[in-house]
Image (spheres, grey):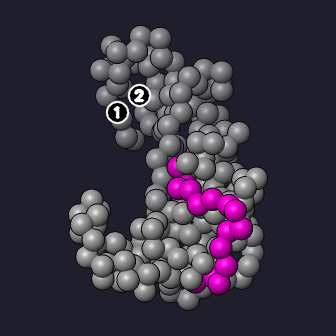
Amino acid sequence: MIYVDLTLLNKVVENVMFCLGLVVDLCSRIHLIIFCKEESKEMIVSFHAKKENNRYGFICLDQSSTDTWLAICTAVKRALSLSDVAGEEVIGIGFAATCSLVAVDSEGQPVSVSWSGDTRRNVIVWMDHRAVKQAERINSFSSPVLQYCGGSISPEMQPPKGICKNLGQWLGGGWTLAVGEIVCNRR
């Protein structure tokens, strides 16, 4: 069992009942942590809901933001059930996620980033390497701006993902967002 000391949190926020923290990790699992106020140390409840991966060769890894959201919902319901906590007792929720890139249209609906054209596949996972040439090109300019990200861009970072270069199209007025931005804006 893993325990976390919440003594300081309890002193700062006297009326806290439960806060949820979710982490979407690089293995496409949703980790859910429930922090409890009732005692200064409380068990962390963790439930893993796997998302389906869709791989093309070794360089392309895309997923579905809809699947991610459903996995988050499943993880929350399961963890609340395991810990015997009612949804009304939860006063806060926080998300942490990889810097994977999510593509949506102007209405917030998924836009394909997959070579298959499958609109459900609208997440370019951070470890996707389809943008190696774009990263090399960005780095070739030796811009001082690169000092803000460690001196160079990796194909795993969001800027070089190169949707229009690699898929031959752009998003048609849509948006690209981080996974954390998508899950924080879902209802």
Where residue 76 appears, as percent x and y from the top left, is: 62, 40
> Looking at the image, can residue 135 be seen?
yes
Query: Residue 117's quadrant in the figure?
Result: bottom right
Identify the residue at image location x=29%, y=64%: 145
Identify the residue at image location x=70%, y=62%: 173
Q: Residue furthest bottom?
A: 57
> Looking at the image, can residue 40 be seen?
no
Camera-side residue of 68 and 177: 177
Q: CA distance from mark 1 to mark 2?
A: 6 Å
Query: Residue 73's quadrant in the figure?
Result: top right
On screen, 145 above or below 170? Answer: above
- Amino acid at circle 1: Val
Say if mark 1 contacts mark 2, CB within 8 Å: yes
Taking the magenta stretch, the answer to whether it contains residue 117 is no
Instruction: Tell me which segment is drawn in magenta.
Output: 166-180
Q: Which residue in the protein does label 2 denote?
A: 42
Taking the magenta stretch, the answer to whether it contains residue 179 is yes
- Amino acid at circle 2: Glu
Q: Is residue 157 left or right of residue 70?
A: left
Where residue 3 appears, as percent x and y from the top left, is: 36, 35
Q: Which residue in the protein does label 1 denote?
A: 4
Count neighbours of disc 1 (C-alpha within 10 A) and say few if under 14, some if 14 to 19, many if 20 or more: few
Camera-side residue of 55 and 3: 55
Q: Is residue 145 left or right of residue 113?
A: left
Identify the residue at image location x=67%, y=43%: 186
Where residue 27 appears, as percent x and y from the top left, is: 49, 64
